[in-house]
Image (tube, helix red, strand yellow):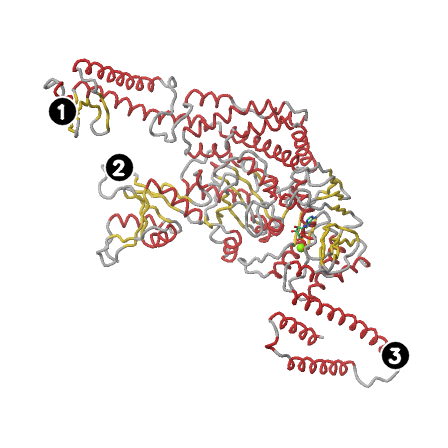
């Protein structure tokens, strides 16, 4: 490589420490990128790739973005999961000797962004850390934008880790560089997060106040990993970090990865959108903080009956008083995101407008309190009691910040008159100076008789007196000093004017500088109250989520559930999401009962009749109940479930390289190994991904296993009719079916759940509804008849064989051994299949017919 310039040497030196980030290297008004960074950034950002020293034999690839619009480019890179190191000039270029000193002042990573534009306001932005100990893992979630820290100890091995992390809004995970490659790969591919490394995990005494409540060494080590990482990379105050909360996973309804995904709690399976998820239906919160809290609740429903009842009680209170609730919603509309405001105050990136918003939000709190006191529900009154805001914060802001400040904090105009004496003096000086100039203008107009004479200002020449050319003859020679000539005017100055100008500019410059200093001071004063603000944010979010529950419960006709230890009984249950997307009143409600006597429901019925819907609506109802929301039905007596397991739908986990059937079996295994008597299992058409007998055998064995060993409440839907016979042998299994009626050769779905097994499979009718060609449908009907014929014939053969066997048993001589009999049977079968194969006229067949034929042949060959 050619000899490096000193600046390039400096670049390479800095880049060494930031290998996994784009290094934004400040050069004048641009951030420049070089080498590989430049090539990749040019591609990702769609900007032009150029060369530095293009005449040299080895020109360096280079691209750049203007300093003032850098934020947009950084945002793009961060959203794609990259990191960006911001390298600034840290000394004044004018006074620097040699190359200007440069340093990385911040490493922006997906998990550490604080800029409003890069955050989704309705979602947390977690950076997580993962630490491995002998038989356990610890996960730490931190949200730098809100200051939250949560710790979870996972005892169930690696699987437990993935299930826990799945679906959390994590952007980045900090791990040890020694975490096995394979596990690192899984984190990346399954969770789509940026990986970062931090090996230094010694506990820094500075962190003590954040974890006084913790003494488990593992938790402390894990917490240190993330704090060390953040401190090393962010180089900023972390004053708003809140005390770590240990999430007691055993106190929450546990939803494994499959259930979170299959039940579409916060996003839909296919499109990954909020629209169509349970969150979409339930989110009637007004504030972004409330929306974030709701999402967290959905991920971790409660187990404690008392806590659930407390929430329900509050919802009932809100439900009962519509007018007051509406007033609360109105009030909440003017409460800004206190949590993130607090975060930005600590980080030092709030402006005067943010503080103004903080003030107006805080001023709404007493109103909120008063409104809460108007409810007759005592629980709501208690909430009001707790709602407290330190009046001093409002006082500080009220005294200092003007009502409508500009965005910039460096150009003045943000501090109120009367807040600071010195500032007032500067402002007076500037105002007086301006006043003097206005008077001068009047005076000179009169003295010269030039009516259009005016005094103006521009940045280059400062204040000047302007006289149009037409009036020049009126101006006495030598009255002013000429400064500038325009096409139709002359501009002049006087020594007096310049003197005043000096005073005004000096006062303005000083006042702008002072305003900035004062602003920083105010920010520091408010910083002291960050814990107060965070507590308040939590209380406001709590009110917001629960008023939201009441609002949605009222508009969608939900009822308050009760809880029981033995029996679950839901009358006229509905699916909360599907009923919303269907026309009013078209969703058919159904009852669901599960108790110790009948803990497995085997659901049969044609395709498209509503089996999956019925199962999901139970799970969603259970979750809604356990987060403290009313539920979609006429009445509900629920059980408190400890875990929900699902096997629903055929979503291939292709990213992780697993086929549908494998996923199916993994999900089934996960349920069977972890479920307890208090769990809810939903198995939807399990065994479908493999051949008929295989699948049926597995399905039956799984049901028997649950029935005999786990006794979890289970809904099991199947298209294998044969399984309905299980009710004869398994005493706690009950058959139900979804009713469908045949009407003039078409099937009519009634979506009604009835007791007993279904009598027919209506697959072909569904195909007809899907508009498959008539000839194909007819052919399928024929094949079905044939197959059914075969089955009957087969059972006749079986009966005859049995009769024969019993005859043999009576002493008649048999000419063949059992083995020989089998061989000869296979042989004739083999010959038959070969003959049929030979007879096929391939070119007379459609592909579908060929498939059918092949199916038949294979079946015969396997007999
Ligand atoms: P299955 O699992 O039996 O194949 P689904 O549960 O997927 O059937 O339901 C198929 C469609 O039938 C749903 O998308 C929905 O539109 C409709 N459906 C299901 N249950 C009901 C119901 N209770 N009331 C009205 N429509 C329903
Ligand atoms: Mg289904």
Q: Nearest the camera: 282 or 824?
A: 282
| Secondary structure under the numbered disc 2 in the rendered image | loop
**Disc 3: which residue:** 807
Going 75% across and 72% down the picture, which residue do you hit? 790
Taking depth in this image into account, of 535 and 578 the one nearest to the observer is 578
Discs 1/3, front: 1
Discs 3/2, front? 3
Element under label 3? Answer: helix
Disc 1 marks which residue? 482
Numbered tag placed on residue 92 in the rendering: 2
Q: Tell me the residue at 67%/75% (across/down).
A: 857
Q: Residue at x 89, y 82 (%)?
A: 811
Q: Nearer the viewer, residue 386 or 852?
A: 852
Q: Earlier in the sequence, mark 1 or mark 2?
A: 2
Location of residue 180 in the rendering, given as x and y in whole percent from the top left corner? 50, 56
| Relative height, residue 190 to residue 764 (above, below) | above
Determine the residue located farthest toward the right in the rendered image: 810
């Amino acid at each position: 490589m050619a000899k490096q310039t000193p600046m390039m040497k400096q670049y390479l030196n800095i880049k060494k420490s930031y290998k996994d980030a784009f290094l934004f290297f400040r050069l004048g008004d641009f951030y420049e990128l070089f080498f590989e960074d430049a090539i990749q950034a040019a591609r990702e950002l769609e900007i032009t790739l150029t060369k530095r020293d293009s005449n040299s034999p080895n020109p360096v690839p280079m691209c750049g973005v203007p300093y003032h619009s850098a934020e947009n480019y950084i945002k793009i890179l961060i959203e794609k999961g990259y990191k960006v190191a911001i390298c600034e000039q840290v000394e004044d270029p004018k006074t620097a000797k040699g190359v200007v000193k440069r340093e990385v002042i911040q490493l922006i990573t997906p998990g550490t962004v604080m800029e409003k534009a890069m955050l989704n306001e309705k979602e947390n932005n977690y950076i997580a850390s993962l630490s491995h100990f002998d038989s356990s893992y610890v996960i730490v979630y931190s949200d730098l934008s809100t200051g939250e820290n949560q710790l979870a100890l996972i005892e169930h091995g690696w699987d437990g880790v993935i299930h826990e992390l799945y679906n959390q809004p994590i952007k980045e995970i900090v791990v040890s560089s020694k975490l096995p490659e394979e596990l690192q790969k899984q984190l990346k591919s399954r969770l789509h997060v940026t990986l970062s490394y931090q090996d230094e995990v010694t506990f820094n005494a500075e962190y003590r106040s954040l974890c006084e409540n913790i003494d488990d060494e593992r938790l402390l080590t894990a917490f240190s990993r993330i704090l060390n990482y953040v401190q090393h990379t962010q180089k900023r105050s972390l004053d708003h970090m809140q005390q770590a909360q240990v999430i007691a996973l055993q106190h929450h309804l546990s939803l494994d990865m499959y259930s979170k995904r299959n039940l579409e709690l916060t996003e839909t399976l296919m499109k990954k959108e909020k629209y169509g998820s349970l969150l979409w239906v339930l989110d009637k919160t007004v504030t972004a903080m409330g929306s974030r809290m709701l999402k967290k609740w959905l991920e971790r429903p409660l187990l404690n009956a008392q806590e659930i009842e407390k929430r329900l009680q509050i919802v009932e209170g809100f439900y009962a008083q519509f007018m007051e609730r509406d007033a609360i919603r109105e009030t909440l509309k003017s409460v800004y995101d206190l949590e993130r405001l607090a975060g930005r105050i600590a980080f030092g990136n709030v402006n005067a407008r943010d503080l103004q918003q903080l003030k107006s939000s805080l001023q709404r709190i007493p109103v909120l309190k008063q409104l809460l006191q108007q409810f007759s529900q005592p629980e709501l009154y208690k909430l009001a009691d707790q709602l407290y805001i330190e009046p001093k914060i409002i006082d500080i802001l009220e005294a200092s910040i003007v009502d409508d400040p500009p965005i910039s904090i460096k150009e003045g105009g943000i501090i109120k008159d009367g807040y600071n004496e010195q500032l007032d003096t500067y402002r007076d000086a500037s105002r007086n100076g301006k006043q003097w100039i206005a008077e001068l203008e009047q005076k000179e107009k009169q003295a010269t008789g030039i009516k259009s004479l005016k005094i103006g200002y521009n940045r280059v020449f400062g204040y000047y007196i302007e006289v149009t050319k037409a009036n020049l003859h009126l101006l006495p020679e030598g009255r002013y000093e000429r400064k500038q000539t325009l096409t139709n005017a002359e501009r002049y100055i006087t020594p007096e004017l310049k003197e005043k100008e000096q005073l005004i500019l000096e006062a303005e410059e000083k006042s702008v500088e002072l305003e900035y200093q004062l602003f920083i001071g105010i920010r520091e004063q408010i910083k002291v109250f960050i814990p107060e603000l965070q507590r308040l944010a939590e209380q406001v979010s709590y009110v917001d989520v629960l008023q939201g529950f009441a609002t949605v419960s009222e508009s969608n006709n939900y009822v308050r559930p009760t809880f029981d230890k033995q029996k679950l009984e839901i009358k006229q249950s509905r699916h909360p999401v599907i009923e919303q997307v269907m026309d009013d009143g078209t969703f058919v409600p159904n009852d669901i009962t599960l108790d110790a006597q009948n803990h497995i429901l085997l659901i049969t019925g044609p395709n498209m009749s509503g089996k999956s819907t019925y199962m999901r609506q139970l799970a969603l109802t259970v979750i809604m109940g356990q987060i403290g929301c009313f539920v979609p039905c006429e009445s509900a007596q629920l059980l408190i479930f400890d875990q929900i397991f699902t096997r629903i739908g055929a979503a291939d986990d292709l990213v992780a390289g697993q086929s549908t059937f494998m996923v199916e079996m993994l999900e089934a295994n996960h349920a069977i190994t972890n479920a307890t008597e208090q769990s809810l299992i939903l198995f939807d058409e399990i065994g479908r991904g493999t051949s008929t007998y295989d699948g049926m055998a597995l399905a039956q064995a799984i049901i028997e296993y649950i029935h005999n060993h786990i006794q979890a409440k289970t809904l099991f839907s199947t298209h294998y009719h044969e399984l309905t016979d299980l009710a004869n042998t398994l005493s706690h299994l009950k058959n139900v079916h979804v009713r469908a009626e045949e009407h003039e050769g078409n099937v009519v779905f009634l979506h009604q759940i009835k007791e007993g097994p279904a009598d027919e499979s209506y697959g072909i009718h569904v195909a007809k509804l899907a508009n498959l060609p008539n000839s194909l449908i007819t052919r399928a009907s024929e094949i079905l008849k044939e197959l059914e014929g075969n089955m009957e014939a087969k059972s006749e053969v079986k009966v005859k064989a049995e009769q024969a066997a019993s005859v043999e048993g009576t002493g008649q001589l048999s000419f063949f051994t059992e083995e020989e009999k089998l061989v000869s049977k296979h042989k004739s079968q083999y010959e038959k299949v070969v003959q049929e194969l030979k007879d096929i006229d391939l070119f007379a067949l459609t592909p579908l017919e060929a498939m059918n034929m092949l199916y038949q042949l294979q079946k015969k060959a396997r007999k």
